[in-house]
Image (cartoon, rainbow, N blue to C red):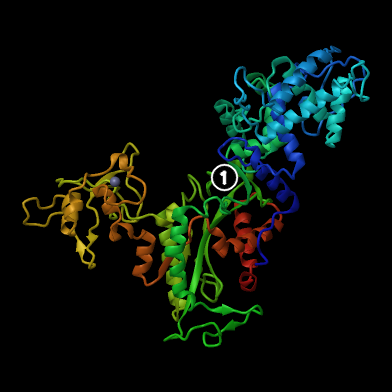
Amino acid sequence: MTCEEVLDEEDEYQYQRAACFLPADGELALEEIDVANKADLEVAEMDSFAGLYRIDAATDLDGAYPDNEPDADVDAEPEGNSGFGAMHSDGYRRQAPTIPDARLALGDLERILYPKRQKKKGSEAEYETCQTPLDPVTRARVDDIRSFLWRYCDFDADGKPRNISAGSWMQASMDIAGSETKGSWRARILRASAKSYIQTRELPMHDYGKRKSRINNEELSSEIQIHLQSVGKYASAEDIVKFSKDDDVQKRYDFTKPICLTTAKLWMSLLGYRWTKEPKGQYQDGHEREDVVKYRQEVFLPAWAKFEKRLRVWTDDNIHLKLDEDPNATPLADTRNTVVWFHDESTFYAHDRRAVRWVHKDESAKPQPKGEGASLMVAHFVSADYGYLQSPDGTETARVLFKAGKGRDGYYTNERIIQHAEKAIEIVQKHYPNDDHVLIFDNATTHVKRADNALSARHMPKNPVRSWGVTVPVKNTNGTTMCHPDGKPQKTKVPMEPGRFANGEPQPLYFPDGHEKAGWFKGMTQILQERGFEAESKLRAECKAFQCPPGGEIRCCCRRFLYNQPDFKQVESVLEMTCRAKGVRVLFLPKFHCELNFIEQVWGCAKRVYREFPPSSKESDLEKNVVDALNSVSLLMMRR
Ligand SMILES: [Zn+2]
């Protein structure tokens, strides 16, 4: 596809930066940071150290050095960490550790790093047990501190320095940092952690997985979420930085400085934002989920394989191979082609000029905040054979323009999608009667919705009940829900649809007329007995809270067993039922596999054209622009 949306370089870079910090379980995991990406590693480490030692203007442990060297590291400020700087502003200088103190600490450190096998008193064979092994990150830090202290204390027996930095707290730290091609910032961290060890004998433990990020403060996190929502669709990490600069925020959350951009990006991730395309461009997360794989392998792909050989094949030169010309085609009894129509919805915003932004993981297509102007939702079908679903002359089209939102056209409900499918079927059957048609939909909740009274074991009682049924809203003749005068929807109880025996015969769930309990709901026991499952009918109603033992054992309780009966498992969605009645097959894409939806690329093309149009806030312009943009995508472009 030439039309595929491409992240531009900056976007891609930002995304990778953010991806470096994707937390494993909601907390920062250093293991996930690409170590090759030194900049990220360093920033993450700095944040961590700053947290450990509270390096800031008020408590900077860095201080004077015995030899009164000039204050060389005031410019040690890395970009984007403007709060860390401002050192020595009060002219106060603290003492560097003395050489004897440093030597004692060095000795202790070496015993941790290189535990000697020491004989215990009175026993030849026993050795002192080794210290807890250090994780690699801590080990590397401790090694650095050791090298630093060693260099600082490196005097010979006569008290002569053995290296030029011996006795200079500042210079020794710079040497060690320099040997790792790290700057004065690293030197400062080194001094802070060494000093802390000398004073407290506490190791700078690597604790990325344990240390709570400030974002774990629920109050703060919810306040930031609200702030980001108020910013609207293009909320960015920069907005968190700005937020953290607010005096009031600083005071309330005890910030000594605004947070840096990298931290802000991490927080975006922790708050559930992902740098990605519109919500429709799903993340990869769920691809390999067990249920998704199962559906893809056992339902979607076999169904696709069934009509695949009847699809028209297009060569690279856009020439249609007739069925008998396709060398890969198997001879078929008839020459009917199958046309696959992909359905999708996409929202165009009046002010939309951007393709990629931070998208919250829970975000779905919904009415947009005021910031981006009016919106128009488009729902359409597209095929590689005919392009948009419309009559050849274009006068009849399945395109639906929809002003989503309260007080506008409402929401794109299951009823609407069914109406849309019916309209599409009407057009294809009228204009393309020689093809068979398949409609492909996303696996969205509103699409796969089952009938309210569809067969379901979820709430069935075990024993007969006089008036058991399914509570459904009352609808008037044109499908709208009826309400009570107080605005609450009217509800009514209806019987559940019958099940099906193994031979396909219907199994009514209510006792027939003439039975002593005529009209009563049979209950699970009776339903199972009628199916010949005598033993299973004696199982308990359900495992506690329907949390059945793992491992796929289905004979633990009546409910689980019924749940796995073929007719209970294969309840059709309303959409499938409606279309099947009209002779059209429906297939749902596996979840998280939107990339399989060919129309995604068509939206991408149309949106790029759309963004070229002069901006306008008028709804009438919006509609015209959207239609023009959609029409600009030619059939030829779609096939590529
Ligand atoms: Zn069970």
In the depicted view, which residue is nearer to us: 272 or 492?
Answer: 272
Counting every numbered tag in the picture gives 1
Expressed as whole percent of the image width and height from the top left, the position of residue 207 reads 63, 30
Q: Residue at x 84, y 11 (%)?
A: 92
User: Does the image show residue 53?
Assistant: yes
The residue where tag 1 is placed is: 368
User: Does the image show residue 259?
Assistant: no
405 to the left or right of 563: right
Q: Give the vertical position of 532 relative to 285 (above or below).
A: below
Q: Classify mark 1: residues with Cα within 10 Å, few (<14), some (14-19) or many (20+).
A: some
Q: Give the vertical position of 246 relative to 265 (above or below).
A: above
The amino acid on which the numbered mark 1 sits, given as a three-letter code, is: Gln
82 to the left or right of 472: right
- In the picture, residue 208 is in which quadrant? top right
Expressed as whole percent of the image width and height from the top left, the position of residue 354 reads 68, 50
101 to the left or right of 71: left
In the depicted view, which residue is nearer to us: 618 or 274?
Answer: 274
Q: Is disc 1's CB within 8 Å of ligand 1?
A: no
Expressed as whole percent of the image width and height from the top left, the position of residue 75 reads 87, 27
> The C terminus is located in which quarter?
bottom right
Q: Give the vertical position of 402 relative to 177 (above or below).
A: below
- In the picture, residue 81 is in which quadrant? top right
> The N terminus is located in which quarter?
bottom right
Q: Give the vertical position of 414 relative to 398 (above or below).
A: above
Expressed as whole percent of the image width and height from the top left, the position of residue 523 reads 18, 49
- In the picture, residue 73 is in which quadrant? top right
Q: What secondary structure is marked by label 1?
A: loop
In the depicted view, which residue is nearer to us: 333 or 297?
Answer: 297
